[in-house]
Image (cartoon, rainbow, N blue to C red):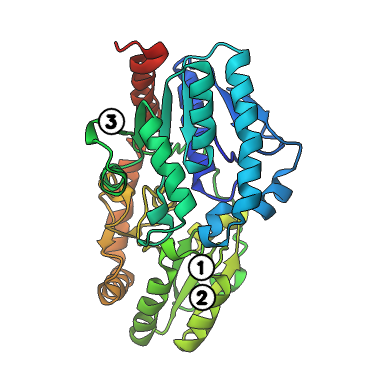
Amino acid sequence: MLGWELPPHNSGGLGVACFQLCKSLAKNNVDIDFILPYEGDHNINFMKVHSTSPVTYEKFNYRFNVYEGSQYLSTHELTGEQLNYENFVAEKALSEEYDIIHAHDWLTFRAGIKAKQVANLPLIVHVHSIESDRAGGQPGHPMIRDIEAMGMMMADKIIAVSERTKQAIAHEYNIPLEKISVVHNSVDIEELELLDQTNIYTYLSVLKNNDYKIVTNIGRLTIQKNITGLLYAAQDVVKKMPKTIFLIVGSGDQHNELIELSAELGIFRNVIFTGFQRGKAWRDAFAISDLFVMPSVSEPFGITPLEAINYGLPSLISYQSGVSEVYRSCLKVNFWDKKQMANQIVGFLSNDALAKTMQLNAEDELRKMNWDKSAKKLTREYEKHSRGVLV
C-alpha cells in the first residue's frame, strides 16, 4: 500500500481515508505494508508502516504540502523526493512476497508502476481526486496530469471514490469505464471522538446566547473548495440575517485572499478565520455551529459532512461532490449558484423544525454507513487480480 500521509500526521482527508480503509481491510485478513515518505509515530497495530525517509512529517509537509495548490509545487524538489520513494518501494517489492500493489493518488503512482515492472505484480491505483478537481475545474499542473495518465493506463484496475470521479477519469484520461470500479469512502462513527462539556469557542457561545446563528466550513482554503463562492453567498445572508457568523476552519493558499475578500464584501465582522485545527478545536467547531456548508467546485468524495452528522450538525453540500451520491438527508446546491446557496442557508437558519428533522434523518443514514462495506468491495478486487489470476 503506497500513500503520502496517515493520521495524526496528515493535512487532509486522504490520510484519514487510507487509515480507515486499511483498518477495515485488516479485518478481512489483508496483510498490509504501508509505505510513507516521512518518519512519524502513528501508533498503528493493524498494519506495518514503513518510512522511506528519516525526515519528520512537519519538515516534510513544509516542503511538500502538495494539497495546498499544485501551482506552488517545486517540481524539481518533489520529483527528487518521489524518486527516493520509488526506489524504496521497488526494493521492498522485490525483497518480500506480495500479491498486490495498491497506490493512492498521483503522488505514489510512479512508485507503483516501478514496483509493478520490477516485481511483475498487479497494480491497483486508487483515485481520491484528479488534477482538474484540485485546480477547480481547470487543467492544472501538466506534470501531475502526465503522472495521473500514466498511472491509470499502466494500472490493472482503477478504484474511484465516487461515480462522479469515475466519469471524470474516463472523460479526462480516455480510460474505459469497465476498467474503473467505484468504492465509496465512508466514516466510522466509533472512531469519532465524543464532545466534552465545554466548548473552546467561548465568544461564539456568547453570540449564540444572543440569538446569533453559526455557519461553518471546515477544509483546505483552496480554489477547489469554493470558499470564495461561500463568502459571496454570505454577503446576501448577512443582509437578510445580520446575526449570522461564518466560521471558516482551515488553512491553504487562499487564506489571505479570502480575508481580504471578506473585507471587500463588507462582512469582515461576520466572518472568523481560525486557521488549521485538529482534535478538540476541530470537534468544537462542529458543535458550536448550526449548519455545515461544503460548496466545493469539484469534490471527489468529501467525508466532512458525514463527520458533521456525528456532532449534531446538518449540511448544505454541492451537487458537485461524491458524498452527494450517498448522503440524502441534507441540502444540496450547484456550487456556482450563490443566490440559491444564500437562500438555502437563510431558509434553513429560519426553520428550527427543518434542522431537527434533517439531523435525525442524517443520524439514521450515518448508522448504516461503515468502511467494512468498502473494504469488502476492495478485497474482491484484490482476489480478482492477485498474481494476475481472475476469479
Near mark 2 (Cα within 10 A), the count class, few <14, some 14-19 or many ≥20, is some
Q: Are marks 1 and 2 in contact (CB under 8 Å)?
A: yes
Q: Nearer the viewer, residue 40 or 157?
A: 157
Q: Position of residue 234 (x, y in %)?
A: 39, 78
Q: Return the residue at label 1.
A: 248
Taking the view exactly as shown, the residue that stands out farthest to the right is: 54
Q: Return the residue at label 3.
A: 179
Q: Position of residue 372 (x, y in %)?
A: 39, 27
Amino acid type indicated by mark 1: Ile
Tell which tag, 1 or 3, sits nearer the viewer: 3
Q: Is residue 118 left or right of residue 185?
A: right
Q: Nearer the viewer, residue 2 or 227?
A: 2
Whichever of callouts 1 and 3 sits on the residue coming sooner in the sequence is 3
Q: Position of residue 209 (x, y in %)?
A: 50, 74
Amino acid type indicated by mark 3: Lys
Q: Residue at x 33, y 71 (%)?
A: 349
Q: Nearer the viewer, residue 2 or 237?
A: 2
For the residues labelled 1 and 3, the Cα–Cα distance comes to 39 Å
User: Is residue 300 visible to us here?
Assistant: yes
Instruction: Tell me, for residue 284, which label it has, or none.
Output: none
Tell which tag, 1 or 2, sits nearer the viewer: 2
Q: Residue at x 28, y 44 (%)?
A: 326
Q: Return the residue at label 2.
A: 258
Q: Is residue 106 left or right of residue 34?
A: left
Does 72 sit above or below residue 255?
above
Q: Residue at x 44, y 65 (%)?
A: 223
Whichever of callouts 1 and 2 sits on the residue coming sooner in the sequence is 1
